Image (spheres, grey):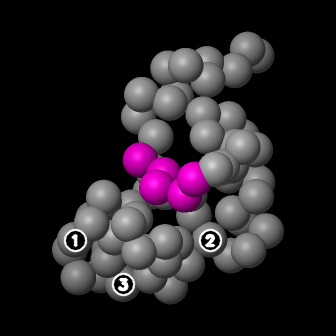
Amino acid sequence: MDCKKTENLSRCNCKYEPCERKGLCCECLAYHLRSRELPACAFPNNVEKNHDRRFERFAKLVSDGEI
């Protein structure tokens, strides 16, 4: 399978600079899962800007109907 980095970048809302994994979704996901987090694309922009990507934060957003 070929990586579609350019296409992925158009949808990437990650605010962390300089992230070497931007557009490389498989690497990004593996990196965040090791830390019990989800990547930026799982969160709305207003939450992503705070860099709080914990599973618990995602679950709260879901339970509050924000996602």
Task: From the viewer's side, name the closer residue of 4 and 9.
Answer: 9
Q: Which residue is disc 1 drawn over? A: 66
Q: For the residue carrying disc 3, how many other residues have a C-alpha within 10 Å: few (<14), some (14-19), or many (20+)?
A: few
Kind of residue indicated by mark 1: Glu
Above/below status of 20 relative to 5: below
Whether the residues at callouts 3 and 2 have beta carbons within 8 Å, the answer is no
> First in sequence: mark 3 or mark 1?
3
Q: For the residue carrying disc 1, how many other residues have a C-alpha within 10 Å: few (<14), some (14-19), or many (20+)?
A: few
> In the picture provided, is 44 more to the left or to the right than 11?
left
- Position of the C terminus by quadrant: bottom left
Residue at the spot x=48%, y=77% of the render?
52
Give the label on residue 37, or none. 2
Kind of residue indicated by mark 2: Glu
Instruction: Confirm whether the magenta stretch covers residue 14.
Output: yes
Separation of marks 2 and 1 at Cα, in angstroms: 18 Å
> Where residue 65 sits in the image (x, y, percent)?
20, 74
